Image (cartoon, grey):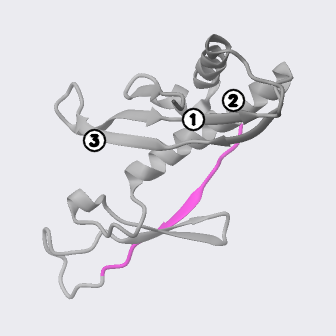
């Protein structure tokens, strides 16, 4: 199996390291050449122009779900023309009373080549299969409710 990795770097910019008086801003590097500025969520004092771990988690799930859906659709002969998603991670208390990402909502919009359109039940079944086979969803299966809401 693969070992997939990132590099993370944080450097204190304040003179002293004191509770509530330091920045959580850091950089995550992917594949030795893509640096992404990361911080805490804005509700926790982070810079809203940076991504945060909760968004990154929603992004990972959304990407994995899409790639799984595309693989299944190709295997089924469905001519997918485009796929987009709006993923939202929701913070709350888990059953242990700890702050957690308790739910991630996916809102995939799939467009097909002209002349092809599965019915709503077929599309829902394919989305469900994509969820069941997605590596990231399987990792989160016991701790996060994942809801897929197709576009209206």
The reply to whether discs 3 and 2 touch (Cβ–Cβ < 8 Å) is no
The reply to whether discs 1 and 2 touch (Cβ–Cβ < 8 Å) is yes
First in sequence: mark 3 or mark 2?
2
Side of 70 where 120 appears, left or right: left
Q: Residue at x 69, y 37 (%)?
A: 67
Would you place residue 21 above or below residue 132 in this image? below
Which element carries disc 2, helix, strand or loop? helix
Q: Which residue is mark 3?
A: 91
Query: Disc 3 or disc 1, which is closer to the eye?
Result: 1
Side of 140 where 130 appears, left or right: right
Residue 15 in view in this figure: yes
Q: Which residue is mark 1?
A: 108
* In-front residue for pair 111/136: 111
Q: CA distance from mark 3 to mark 1?
A: 21 Å
In magenta stretch: residue 105? no
Point out which mark residue 69 bears.
2
């Amino acid at each position: 199996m693969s070992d997939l990795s990132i590099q993370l770097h944080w450097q204190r910019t304040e003179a002293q390291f004191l509770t509530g008086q330091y920045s959580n801003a850091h950089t995550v590097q992917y594949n030795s050449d893509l640096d992404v500025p990361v911080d805490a969520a804005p509700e926790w004092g982070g810079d809203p122009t940076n991504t945060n771990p909760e968004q990154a988690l929603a992004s990972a799930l959304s990407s994995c779900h899409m790639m799984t859906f595309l693989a299944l659709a190709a295997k089924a002969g469905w001519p997918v023309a485009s796929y987009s998603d709006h993923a939202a991670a929701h913070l709350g208390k888990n059953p242990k009373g700890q702050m957690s990402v308790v739910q991630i909502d996916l809102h995939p919009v799939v467009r097909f080549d002209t002349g092809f359109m599965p019915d709503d039940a077929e599309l829902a079944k394919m989305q469900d299969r994509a969820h069941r086979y997605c590596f990231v969803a399987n990792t989160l299966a016991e701790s996060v409710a994942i809801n897929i809401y197709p576009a209206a």
